[in-house]
Image (tube, helix red, strand yellow):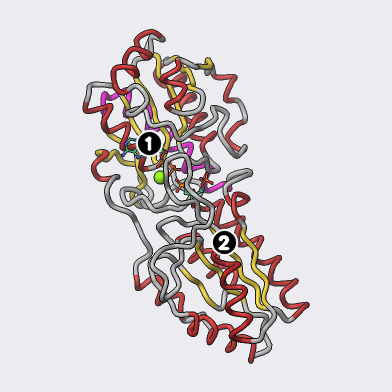
Amino acid sequence: MTRLGLLTSGGDCPGLNAVIRGAVLSGVVSYGYDFVGFRDGWKGVLEGDVVPLPRHAVRGIARFGGTILGTSRTNPLTSGGAEAVRESLRRLAVDGLVAIGGEGTLAAAQELAKRGINVVGVPKTIDNDLDATDVTFGFDTAVQTATEAIDRLRTTGESHHRCMIAEVMGRNAGWIALHAGMASGAHAILIPELTVSLRQVAAWVESAHSRGRAPLVVVSEAFVLEGQDSPFSPRGLDTFGRPRLGGISVLLEHQLQELTGIETRATILGHIQRGGAPTAFDRVLATRLGFAAVDSAANGRWGTMVSLRGTTIVNVGFDAALGRLKTVPEDRYQEAAILFG
Ligand SMILES: Nc1ncnc2c1ncn2[C@@H]1O[C@H](COP(=O)(O)OP(=O)(O)O)[C@@H](O)[C@H]1O
Ligand SMILES: O=P(O)(O)OC[C@H]1O[C@](O)(COP(=O)(O)O)[C@@H](O)[C@@H]1O
Ligand SMILES: [Mg+2]
């Protein structure tokens, strides 16, 4: 019997469990496959740390956030390499892997595929910044969660006649800020793709204030204020050596209050955006990606990943997914700018 191994790797996002369930159900129902799950991403592969994934193990999990398998940022190439992965799969009689992760996970999967390991990828990023897929699961949930939180900030902001700043995730791309900002009626949206001067932000805030509104600014964690040379990152590095972002809104709080004289409060939404139950949209997308990943494995399309093009799930080579980010185009930002001030 064919046995596939599933793993989730990199930062979590709502919908991972729906992918796992979709893959197992499709594999069991359509192909008679058997599944195991590796705990904590590539770490579980290297350590042979597996859990059996019979059909009943995935019962009802599509509606839960996080990942039942756990995740990590272990890089298999620096922690044992392809030979260690091959040996572990051989020992566990696993015929192929479904790796669910971000561009780092997929880069590792690509390298392993080049070395003859059977692996298919499922793209994951809360930031929605992978170029080879139109939308990633988790993004819709993050936008919904951020929008609900920002709606709450508005009512308290309006009561106190304050300027409220909401800081959202977005390491390289401002998609969450753009969408949550448009949905919540922000008077300024600040994204990593475009520097803006403090004076311009203050002008938008003052314009909204002068119309009797409580100004609302939505800012991506990686936004760079004109005059700065990199995103605000006072918290050291993450386990992969990337700067940990977060806090630009607090900097803006002081500077905007000083410049405008309007009482200002900043809120960092942080990991709340990544936690909790996926929206119906994300459950459906993630389930379909899980189905398609198993179809890819069944058809021997190793070394590829599944992706959404329009409303269709297609297969693309890892190359298409890597090396290029899907950032917010200037025209999408200018379109939203009609709402500013
Ligand atoms: N080029 C690469 N090749 C192999 N592994 C990588 C590469 N880049 C990143 N990784 C590994 O993949 C891990 C997960 O990254 P990724 O899937 O992008 O998720 P996230 O962006 O949420 O951290 C990284 O922490 C790192 O260990
Ligand atoms: O606190 P952690 O887990 O390091 O993750 C925070 C970072 O991960 C991100 O959510 C990106 O994750 P994705 O890989 O899902 O795109 C960033 O927006 C954020 O800077
Ligand atoms: Mg990544």
Most extreme residue toward the bottom is 210
Q: Please, is residue 47 above or below residue 113 in the view?
A: above
Query: Is residue 299 rendered magenta in the image?
Result: yes
User: Residue 167 is drawn in which quadrant?
Assistant: bottom right
* Nearer-N-terminus badge (2/1): 1
Query: Is residue 305 rendered magenta in the image?
Result: no
Identity of the residue drawn at 55% across and 43% down:
14
Q: Amino acid at mark 2?
A: Gly
Query: For mark 2, does the 10 Å Cα neighbourhood hold few (<14), some (14 to 19), or many (20 or more) residues?
Result: many
Give the percent coordinates (x, y) of residue 225.
45, 73
Name the one closer to the observer, 12 or 24.
12
**Where, quadrant-wise, is the N terminus in this rendering?**
top left
Give the percent coordinates (x, y) of residue 162.
70, 79
Residue 8 disc label: none
**Where, quadrant-wise, is the C terminus in this rendering?**
bottom right
Q: Which residue corresponds to mark 2? A: 247
Give the percent coordinates (x, y) of residue 332.
39, 70
Identity of the residue drawn at 52% across and 53% down:
140
Identity of the residue drawn at 60% across and 69% down:
184
